Amino acid sequence: MLSINNVTKTFGGVVALNKCATTVKQNEIVAFVGPNGAGKTTLFDTISGLIKPDYGNITLSIDDNTEELTKISPEKVANLGISRTFQQVRLFPNLTIQDHFIIAQSKNDMRLLAQIVAKNHMHEKDVPFHKKILEQYGIDRDLNLYVSDLSYGQQKLLQIAMAVMREHKIIMLDEPVAGVNAVVQKKIEDILISLKKAGETIMLVEHDMEFVRNIADRVVVMDEGSVMVDGTPEEALSDSQVLEAYLGE
Amino acid sequence: MLTGYLYNILIFSGIYAILTVSLNMAVGFTGLLNLGHVAFFGIGAYTSTLLTMNGVPYIVSLIVAGLVSSVFGVILMYAVRKLKGDYLALATLGFSFVVYSVMLNWSSLTRGPLGIPGIPKPELFGWTINTTSEYLVFTLIVATVSIYIINRITTSRYGKLLEAVRDDEVGLSVYGKPIFSLKVRSLAISAFFAGIAGSLFAHHITFIDPSSFYINDLVLLLTIVLVGGLANNKGVIIATVIIMLIPEALRFVDMPSSILGPARQMIYAIVLIGILLFKPRGLFGRIDLE
Ligand SMILES: Nc1ncnc2c1ncn2[C@@H]1O[C@H](COP(=O)(O)OP(=O)(O)OP(=O)(O)O)[C@@H](O)[C@H]1O
Ligand SMILES: [Mg+2]
């Protein structure tokens, strides 16, 4: 489905990605692990179209249609069905929770004229649906609250909710549980397990190896911008070299 | 006499309300610190003036004034597409200077510093808007429609996208929203209404010269938007009326007119500094100025 072909990216002298190559199949949960600075986030940003690689390319194939993601803009990549969250939460601090849901959900919100003349141009009818999502994600807050008033954990949950609720083929989650407390971590892990059950295709950066063993179909171990090991969780996480050098277990 | 004077203040308040609410759409809602708004105002004024004086019906001139300003808005956004924040502000300020100097130097078209006198009063479907009270009614109609449209946009889902561009454009792009197109359209609409305001202004005072579209007006517009509060249309309208009234109070103080002008500018500057220091979100806003 997703094919990452020898992607190389340098920032000044730093080689963030070095001939990085792997693939993601439909309905697969792939965990990306590796030490700080291994290039995991850079890889996600390159897939999103936020960063253009120096060499190599990334393709997304759906049915018989193949698109080269590395040639198109982030919004086009997103509209092909790549959903993602950011390691450092990126939300819109002066918008409410509901505004965020609407942004994630709307596909026709660029139709300006229609909105000027429309009678009911917000998504009032979706309020019950939005409330249900809040409940599912354990965010016990009012829909009209500005997101800057949410706790960090709630912001992380909201980001995931937005990525899941928009129409997508693949979800990329960059360290979804980093920086949250144990309760939120448990919640997020439960959500991921239910996404797995629902047959989602997920790329995940995650440091908790116990959880990776639990959820991932495949583990990609990265270091210095390259893929070191690519295999089942058993294979990857028992590789002694990996354990010693990269995971410190 | 006193009512005529009051009507005048209200007419200017109406014109300025269009200017400030439209400026707020770009600056407050979309986060484009556009310092080219006076240029759009001037382009609209000159376009409408030149068209009507060459026999084009007023209603056409009014709309074309908006459209021409809008085209310049699109051009400006393309020109500054790689810039953000302070750099965008500087580049758009440059645009204001360029347009000002074109108005000043393209004498064959604009009569340069001499200005253009004798601009005809608007004529709409057989209604010639001659008296101040008629002009007030006309201005209020145009202002109400303009502000209504802008408010419709900013309170719609589209408006939320503009605010999201302001808050985090990279964050927004991964939801599949075309950032640049949002910015272009925002500036184009903002400029359109500035052009409409320019037309209202020109045909009200019936004389324009480049000095009406200079940086001191820009300071006034920005002051009003900041006092009212970024991304708050209601606040900006209230601030417009308040700030239009402040200098009028000066008239009742015995003061030679040579001091009156500079005194106004000083009041605006003091209000601006005061807001920036003590109430950076404006009287009614919740968005911080970055
Ligand atoms: N915009 C940038 N400019 C310069 N260097 C960068 C930039 N982005 C990433 N890097 C560098 O590229 C390398 C890879 O960074 P990246 O963020 O992809 O690592 P990571 O695997 O996500 O690490 P972490 O676990 O800390 O999130 C690092 O050395 C980083 O400093
Ligand atoms: Mg990272």
Image (cartoon, rainbow, N blue to C red):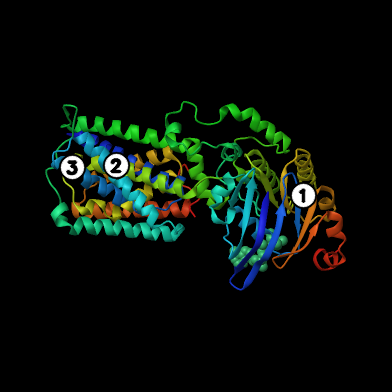
> Mark 2 or 3 closer to N-term?
3
User: What chain is tagged by disc 1?
Assistant: A
Residue B72 visible, this angle: yes
- Report the disc number at residue B107: none
Which residue: 23% across, 59% down? B101
Mark 2 crowd level (few <14, some 14–19, many ≥20, 10 Å Cα): many
In the orientation shown, which residue stands out farthest toward the bottom? A13
Is B275 positioned to the left or the right of B18 in the image? right
Badge 3 element: helix
Callouts 1 and 3 on one subunit: no
Badge 1 element: loop
Question: For residue B55, what is the image quadrant?
Answer: top left
Is A194 positioned to the left or the right of B245 in the image? right
Question: For residue B9, what is the image quadrant?
Answer: top left
> If the picture is divided into quarters, which one holds ligand 2?
bottom right
Callouts 2 and 1 on one subunit: no
Marks 2 and 1, how far apart at CA: 54 Å
Is the residue A242 above or below the residue B172 in the image?
below
- Residue that mark 1 sits on: A181
Q: Nearer the viewer, mark 2 or mark 1?
A: 2
Front residue of B66 and A65:
A65
- Residue that mark 2 sits on: B66
Q: Nearer the viewer, mark 1 or mark 3?
A: 3
Badge 2 element: helix
Q: Amino acid at mark 2?
A: Gly
Q: Amino acid at mark 3?
A: Leu
Front residue of B269 and A40:
A40
Is the residue A115 above or below the residue B240 in the image?
above
Q: Quadrant of the N terminus of chain B?
A: top left
**Residue B151, position in %: x, y?**
42, 35
Marks 2 and 3, how far apart at CA: 12 Å
- Report the disc number at residue B51: 3
